[in-house]
Image (cartoon, rainbow, N blue to C red):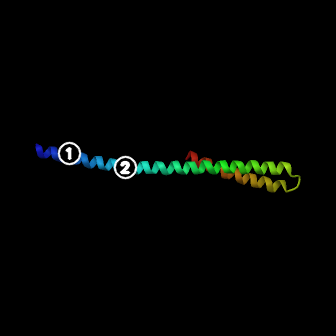
Amino acid sequence: MLEEIKTNIDKLISLYENQKQRADALAAELQQCREELAACKAHASELDSRIDNLKLQYAFSGAGDPAEAKARITKLVREIDRCIKLLEG
């Protein structure tokens, strides 16, 4: 009976250690995801600012090719959409 209790305790210790390792790995993964999320949010904010600046430049400049400006804005919007999908993913 005493041997059986000792075996059960050893099993419990082993299970505990496995779960602790898993929890540590998940905590590290969570931290990495949080850092990636912060980076994507910063990038999206930067792109929003760039879009606003381009819109202002286009609005105040009579010169320039409107199709080219629209293409640049469309490209930036796509990049923002990609970042948003990464944030949601």
Horizontally, residue 68 falls left or right of residue 7, namely right
Q: Residue furthest right?
A: 62
User: Residue 18 location, x and y as percent?
Assistant: 31, 50
Residue at x 40% of width, y 51% of height: 25
Q: Tell me the amino acid under the disc marked 1.
A: Ile
Horizontally, residue 46 falls left or right of residue 29, namely right
Q: Provide the secondary structure element on which disc 1 rests.
A: helix
Residue at x 58% of width, y 51% of height: 39
Horizontally, residue 55 falls left or right of residue 24, namely right
Q: Quadrant of the N terminus?
A: top left
Q: Provide the secondary structure element on which disc 2 rests.
A: helix
User: Residue 23 location, x and y as percent?
Assistant: 38, 47
The residue pinned by badge 1 equals 9
User: Residue 22 location, x and y as percent?
Assistant: 37, 49
Q: Tell me the amino acid under the disc marked 2.
A: Arg
User: Residue 32 location, x and y as percent?
Assistant: 49, 51
Category of crowding for the residue at label 2, using alpha-carbon neighbours closer than 10 angstroms: few (below 14), some (14–19), many (at least 20):
few
Horizontally, residue 10 falls left or right of residue 49, namely left
Measure the C-alpha gap from mark 2 to mark 1: 20 Å
Nearest to the observer: residue 12 or residue 42: 42
The residue pinned by badge 2 equals 22
Nearest to the observer: residue 12 or residue 52: 52
Decide which of tag 2 and tag 1 comes sooner along the chain.
Answer: 1
Residue at x 86% of width, y 52% of height: 61
Nearest to the observer: residue 41 or residue 68: 41
